Amino acid sequence: MGIQFLRGNPQAPKGHAIFIARSRSNSRVVYSTYCLVPPIPMSIAKYLPPLFAAQISSEELQGAESISGMPIPPMLEEGMSLEQLEALADRRGDDLCDIGSTSSEEVERMQMAATSCQEYAQLYANTIPQASQLAQEPTKNTIAEATPIENLDAEELLLQTMSERQKLAEVGKLVGMARYALEGQDKTLLQDTQRRIERLARLLPDKYRGSEIAKAATAPNERGAKLAELYLSRAYKLIDEEYAEIPRIENAIRELKEG
């Protein structure tokens, strides 16, 4: 079953639609997601977290067209009735599309959302052929004004969503991995771990001294391990606002570096 428009015109899709799918085992259960065709061409493969991307084929993620549909959330979810979705689409001016039936399996609901969004995006692209031409012939201003987000991959986008505490926890794990690589003389693992620590360090405020943690974590001596531990301890004291403990740690760091 393809896309059936319950609201809107299949000959002139608006570029934003609410998708519904019914449960095969219980027709009263309705799953839904929101499909958005961004006005600026993009590939959703760069922005999906690895967990989601691993469940969808590269063909579905990349697509052959420059305009891609993006399901938000990336999986059909249960929670709203058909009446609520109809009222929502009417109030917002969205297309409302029935995309068929599905099971309760998360992978199937994720794949169905992705596939249907690409089909909807193709319908939308067919109504504005000039968009493909514009995407293939960017102006000089477009190239000059490209923003850093274009260079983000899925991992970095995921890191951007982490809290400072989560980033510090990840840094702590990577420090342990770096010390393991040093002990085992695994240069490949060490280089990859160093790159990941430095990447996280750039996302942390300067007060946590992320660059110092990265440097100490990969130092080929026991002093480096102790320094990394002290810098991490200092960072956690900051985030927990235990400021009275910081001078003691600062002194320990100073003595270790001077020793």
Image: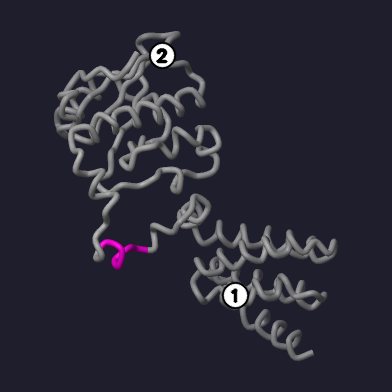
Structural crowding at the residue carrying mark 2, measured as other residues with C-alpha within 10 Å and reported as few (<14), some (14–19) or many (≥20): some
Residue 116, percent from left and from top? 35, 26
Q: Residues within 10 Å of mark 1 (few under 14, many from 20)?
A: some
Dot 1 falls on a residue whose secondary structure is helix
Is-magenta flag for residue 79?
Answer: no
194 in relation to 72, above or below: below
How many angstroms separate mark 1 from mark 2 (CA)?
Answer: 51 Å
Residue 190 occupies quadrant: bottom right
Upstream in sequence: badge 1 or badge 2? 2
Relative to the observer, which residue lies in front, 83 or 55?
55
Residue at figure coordinates x 39%, y 59% from the top left:
149
- Name the residue: 34% across, 25% down: 32
Give the magenta-colored segment's residue range: 142-147
Residue receiving disc 2: 23
Residue 255 placement (x, y as % from top left):
74, 88
Total numbered circles: 2
Q: Secondary structure at mark 2?
A: strand
From the viewer's side, name the closer residue of 10 and 141: 141
Which quadrant is the C terminus positioned in? bottom right
Image quarter (top left, top right, bottom left or bottom right) of the N terminus: top left
Q: As drawn, is 196 to the left or to the right of 47?
A: right
Residue 119 vs 196, above or below: the answer is above
List the residue tagged with mark 1. 211
Q: Amino acid at mark 2?
A: Ser
Percent coordinates x, y for residue 158 in the rendering: 49, 51
- Quadrant for residue 214, please give it: bottom right
Residue type of the residue flagged with mark 1: Ser
- Whether residue 54 sits left or right of residue 100 in the image: it is right
Q: Is residue 126 left or right of residue 22?
A: left
Q: Is residue 92 left or right of residue 62?
A: left
